[in-house]
Image (cartoon, helix red, strand yellow):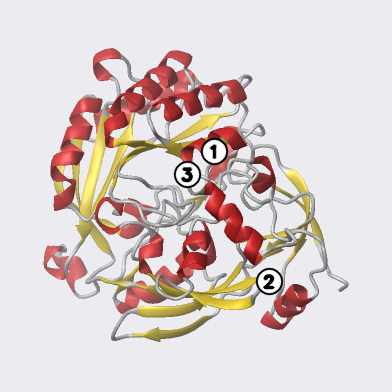
């Protein structure tokens, strides 16, 4: 099959180690079908909007299949809130279409620029994991093209072994063509939020453990450069969807409408000296001081869930070298590992001003699904000399305390470390071998971590 491919330099959102890739973007389902039927022996990996931070959807050794144009919403049931859509539909498109009709996403990551297929393939989690789990919990079923079986319908009850390999399987079990997902009914486009300062790590963890159950959403910004008695000081931001009765009078008549600020943009790569230890320490200090304790603050959903989406290309703030996002999960009994990681960040001055702390609820049967009961810490770390050695030390802390890292964010770990963190990896390899015996589905990350046989 003769493909009209484009040569593009691709990376994850962190812009770490970009690769030159051949990209094929089908404009219609017929083009996708022709490609899949005549894929030959060239490897490929599906790609959505490119918001995974690492090399999950990079494939310099073959093709990258851009799925963003296959984004039809096929059916919506106003009674049940079940949306049937193609995998290329973005969370932003769902919000734009359905918030005015009284429906919201059941789970959302920190950006709305993610496709439904990407949300499933990375089994994304959000600020409500402590009560609601991951995106997979709200997927009724999905259609998956596999090299060995063709199109397969799978769900937690039908072809469940394929479903739980695909959830969190970063595109290596097949191409997610469509999905039926459950939306959440809401009365407004606003969130009612409580803000609370926590002067150190023990305070924020104890507050999360004792009172997160009282909130639908919970997340903490954490100061990763604070030391000693202030180690882990945080701003805890917890809330729920606002009801009409919660809104100021000016919003009561149009509860689903709010004023959007014009988006900002980062037009150039910042010089490397802009985001340094001093500038980030100053930002962290000001952020902590400005955010005083407040109760029942009404804010629109974009401000609460997607504060960085209002800045186009914000990843350019880290300069040409880029950054990595390192997201660690520790079980509750591994709490001291979280302390050790924060101490190492502070001591080595590996600044992160976009650090987020959350409390996870129960895990699910996904073979490579990331969340586990405990705590998760997400860090944006500028790429400076020694970054590889530094992340190896972070990996060691995780292994020593029974933790794991998130595939959607990973750029640097090795296969032995990953296998030690994920006991389901061998079962995942076996599923991939059954669904894709020729090894057509492949990525830079999959080869680095030996996720495919």
| 243 shown above or below 446 | below
Residue 117: x and y, percent? 53, 65
Specify which label sits upstream in the sequence, 3 or 1.
1
Sequence-wise, the earlier of marks 1 and 2 is 2
Q: Is residue 282 above or below residue 133?
A: above
Q: Secondary structure at mark 2?
A: loop
Q: Give the mark toward the camera: 3 or 1.
A: 3
Q: Residue at x 21, y 68 (%)?
A: 251
Which corner quadrant holds the N terminus? bottom right
Q: Nearer the viewer, residue 236 or 329?
A: 329
Q: Are marks 3 and 1 in contact (CB under 8 Å)?
A: no
Image position of 79 (left or right of 343): left
Disc number for residue 418: 1
Whole-percent x and y of residue 201? 25, 26
Residue 352 placement, left or right of 382: left
From the viewer's side, name the closer residue of 294 and 253.
294
Q: Is residue 148 visible?
A: yes
Task: Count residues near mark 3 (Cα–Cα under 10 Å), then give few for <14, some for 14-19, many for 20+.
Answer: few
Query: Residue at 76% of width from left, 77% of height from top?
Result: 37
What's the CA distance linking mark 1 and mark 2? Answer: 27 Å
Quick check: 149 above or below 295? below
On the question of residue 172 being in view, the answer is no
User: Which residue corresponds to mark 2?
Assistant: 148
User: Label 3 vs label 1: CA separation?
Assistant: 9 Å
Give the percent coordinates (x, y) of residue 107: 36, 60
Q: Which percent across, then down, holds residue 307? A: 39, 49
Residue sitting at the far right:
2
- Residue underneath mark 3: 423
Q: Is residue 43 left or right of residue 11?
A: right
């Amino acid at each position: 099959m003769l493909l009209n491919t484009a040569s593009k330099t691709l990376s994850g959102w962190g812009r770490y180690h970009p690769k030159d890739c051949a990209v094929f973007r089908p404009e219609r389902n017929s083009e996708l079908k022709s490609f899949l039927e005549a894929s030959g022996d060239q490897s490929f990996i599906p790609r959505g909007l490119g918001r995974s931070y690492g090399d999950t959807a990079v494939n310099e050794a073959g093709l990258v299949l851009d799925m963003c144009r296959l984004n039809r919403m096929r059916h919506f049931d106003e009674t049940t809130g079940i949306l049937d859509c193609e995998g290329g539909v973005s969370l932003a498109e769902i919000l734009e279409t359905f918030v005015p009709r009284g429906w919201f996403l059941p789970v959302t990551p920190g950006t709305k620029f993610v496709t439904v297929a990407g949300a499933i393939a990375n089994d994304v989690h959000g600020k409500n994991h402590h009560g609601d789990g991951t995106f997979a919990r709200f997927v009724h079923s999905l259609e998956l093209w596999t090299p060995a079986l063709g199109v397969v319908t799978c769900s937690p009850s039908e072809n469940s072994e394929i479903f739980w390999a695909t959830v969190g399987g970063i595109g290596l079990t097949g191409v997610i063509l469509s999905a039926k997902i459950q939306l959440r009914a809401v009365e407004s486009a606003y969130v009612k939020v409580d803000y609370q300062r926590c002067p150190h790590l023990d305070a924020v963890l104890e507050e999360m453990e004792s009172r997160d159950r009282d909130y639908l959403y919970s997340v903490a910004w954490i100061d990763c450069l604070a030391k000693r008695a202030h180690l882990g000081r945080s701003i805890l931001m917890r809330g729920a969807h606002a009801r009409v009765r919660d809104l100021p009078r000016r919003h009561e008549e149009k509860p689903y409408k709010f004023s959007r600020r014009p988006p900002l943009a980062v037009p150039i790569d910042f010089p490397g000296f802009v985001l340094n230890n001093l500038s980030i320490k100053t930002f962290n200090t000001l952020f902590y001081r400005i955010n005083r304790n407040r109760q029942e603050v009404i804010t629109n959903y974009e401000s609460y869930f997607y504060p960085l989406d209002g800045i186009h290309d914000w990843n350019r703030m880290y300069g040409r070298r880029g950054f990595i996002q390192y997201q660690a999960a520790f079980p509750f009994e591994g709490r001291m590992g979280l302390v050790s990681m924060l101490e190492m960040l502070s001591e080595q001055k590996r600044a992160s001003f976009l650090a987020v702390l959350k409390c996870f609820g129960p895990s699910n049967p996904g073979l490579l699904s990331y969340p586990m009961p405990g705590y998760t810490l997400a860090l944006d770390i500028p790429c400076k000399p020694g970054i590889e050695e530094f992340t190896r030390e972070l990996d060691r802390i995780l292994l020593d305390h029974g933790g794991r890292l998130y595939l959607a964010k990973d750029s640097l770990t090795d296969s032995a470390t990953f296998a030690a963190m994920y006991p389901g990896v061998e079962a995942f390899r076996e599923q991939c071998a059954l669904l894709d015996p020729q090894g057509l589905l492949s990525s830079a990350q999959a080869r680095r971590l030996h996720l495919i046989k």
